[in-house]
Image (cartoon, grey):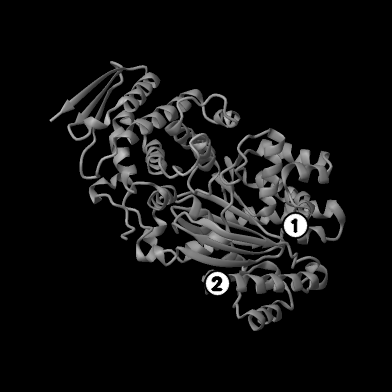
Amino acid sequence: MDDTPRIAAKDWGPFGRPLFNDPSAKALSRVGVVDVGSNSVRLVVFDGAARSPAYFYNEKIMCALGEGLSDTGHLNPEGRRRALSAIRRFQKLSDGLNIQPLTAVATAAVRDASDGADFVAEIERETGLKIHVIDGEEEARLSAQGVLLGWPGSYGLVCDIGGSSMELAEIGGGSVGKRITSALGPLKLRSLPGGKKARKQYIKDTVTELAEFMGEQRNRLFLVGGSWRAIARIDMERRGYPLHVLHEYRMSAKSIDATIRHIQENDPTELRQRCGVSSNRMELVPFAAEVLREVVRAFRPHDIAVSSYGIREGMLYEQMPQKLRDRDPLIEACFFAENKDARIPGFGSTLFNFIQPLFKGAPLDRKRLIKAACLLHDVSWRAHPDYRAEVCFDNATRANLGGLKHSERVFLGLALLHRYKNNRAGTSFEPIFHLIDEKQQLQAEILGKAMRFGAMLWLHHEKPMGELIWQPKKKQLTLVLTSDAAPLFGEVAAARFQSLAGSLEATTEVRVKG
């Protein structure tokens, strides 16, 4: 069976032809990477549309390889034993999942330890896996590339904190610029002699040197790394933020200061339990918080965003051809999902063209969300009808999709909820709706009801459904049906058309041509 989307090239529109079936992308449809860090060892297997991959498998072991490194110069012996055991397991898993060869890198702890080379040799001897020990600048570059995987065309400063180091990298125009590494990892800071006063001065002096090297960086600050994500979880808990998705979560300098005080004033055990932070990670959070406060003070970014994408995603990005890097990760993922799960792959683009007259003046960023919604409008059809609307909203707001702000997740989720349900009141998701204003909520409702109606007019792709004519000044909505489509305009379709008109506060007319 041909698995390419069944839709004519003329219909691709401003978002281009999907590349997930291109041979260069198919080669990356399932990729396994191993990250041997100072604090954790992790296997990630990416699957699906390479430009916006799903996490087919993700396992992390908190080995603390870098624990005590500053004092001994050696890797933590217990951490070394646990890391080897984990990598042995990862290699066996990769054999079973048929994802050989794994790509593996080791970072600060292994490169700084006197027995790092011996450990790498032991791993290769015991498991056959070759570990590439990368320097700090390369670690910064790969981490920044991970950010570019999720935010194509983004600009600003990437700050990646690990257990034994912290890297900075400048990004702009889809490429990585200046980059530098430092010893500001919380494992190292914890063992720094001289107590809190000496540590605070060391952090300040180091960040000052980093700022002098990087120059002015007043744009967005991207936070990468487990310790930053833990602080973001605590910030969410303190604020009562309703959408618990870390990727693209935004913080301000003021909120970070408030959260650091919150960390200092609360019992760490109770706090970590409320926020879902592991005990091992929570031990490092106070040290990471001290670094973050100084980084924000030194660089004064206008915006601070958490990135769930980092070095592992950067390793995938490294393998992508440029034409795949240039694609929109959201649209590529939605094309892939439609082709895999929709009842009629390709109809999403037909639907997009049909409802476009309702959104003529929409900017490209909004049309991008409309396109994504149309591609996803039928992928959850297997869900029970009583819960389908809620499933769609939950999937859109919490799915691992790149290139989406939280407000855009909510807009997309609301549109898909209204694809299956006229009324959004009374759902458990109501607190999340308020992340967008009432005007945007109404626009999402109109989009959802337009898709709900348009989905009633399924025809072969080469046969036109008809057209919608929207006159916003007159508040007149006209449906012009082809003779082929006219029999599809039954009672249910008519009711859905009137529901759409109600949200538009429009009068209606229905005509049949030909």
Q: Quadrant of residue 281?
A: bottom right
Task: Of the two numbered discs 2 and 1 on the same chain, state the one appearing first in sequence.
Answer: 2
Give the percent coordinates (x, y) of residue 407. Answer: 52, 35
The residue beneath circle 2 is 102
Query: Could you tell me if residue 405 is visible in this image?
Result: no
Kindly give the residue lying farthest to the bottom in the view shown. 125
Tell me the kind of residue under disc 1: Pro
Q: Nearer the viewer, residue 356 or 199?
A: 356
Disc assigned to residue 186: 1
Left or right placement of residue 108 versus residue 273 in this view: left
Residue shown at the point (71%, 58%) measured from the top left: 184
Image location (x, y in percent) of residue 290: 75, 48
Location of residue 52 in the rendering, given as x and y in whole percent from the top left corner: 47, 54
Q: Residue at x 53, y 64 (%)?
A: 315
Nearer the observer: mark 2 or 1; the answer is: 2
Determine crowd level at label 2: few under 14, some 14-19, many 20+ residues with C-alpha closer than 10 A: many
